[in-house]
Amino acid sequence: MRWNTYLLTLFLVVGLAACGKEEPPAPETAAPAAEQPAATDAPAAAKSSGGGGYEPAEDERVPGITVSKEELEKQLEAARASTPQPEIPGEEGAKAE
């Protein structure tokens, strides 16, 4: 029984070692500053939607499916206005006192 435990442990250790993290590739040597592109060559930062999600381009928008953030907020406010507030029985007596 004892040798079975050792054999199982050996297989588990070998399996874990085989599935371990690989060494990251060695970083390449940095190019001299003259060869690196200037920071001004970088494209302008895209407008942030605040959520960090994907912002579709105008040609990707589908009417009726793609909804802007403003439209979603309008729908949410309309839903909140039309939703009745729950009546909690214990709160009515506390308000009268």
Image (cartoon, helix red, strand yellow):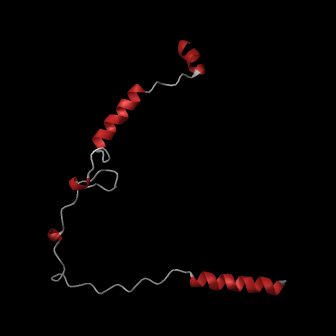
Q: What x and y, as percent, mark residue 67?
A: 30, 45
Q: Check the image and report above or below for 13 versus 49.
A: below
Q: What x and y, as percent, mark residue 34?
A: 15, 82
- Residue shown at 68% from the left, 85% from the top: 11
- Residue shown at 56% from the left, 20% from the top: 91
- Residue shown at 28% from the left, 40% from the top: 70
- The quarter of the picture where residue 39 lies is bottom left
33 with respect to 30 (left or right): left
Q: Nearer the viewer, residue 24 or 19?
A: 19
45 with respect to 51 (left or right): left
- Residue shown at 57% from the left, 23% from the top: 88
Quadrant of the snapshot with the N terminus: bottom right
Q: Nearer the viewer, residue 62 or 91?
A: 62
Looking at the image, how many numbered discs can be counted on the residues?
Answer: 0
Q: Nearer the viewer, residue 66 or 36?
A: 66
5 with respect to 35 (left or right): right
Quadrant of the snapshot with the C terminus: top right
Q: Check the image and report above or below for 80 versus 12.
A: above
- The quarter of the picture where residue 29 lies is bottom left
- The quarter of the picture where residue 16 lies is bottom right
Q: What x and y, as percent, mark residue 46?
A: 23, 58
89 with respect to 7 (left or right): left
Residue that protrudes farthest toward the right in the picture: 1
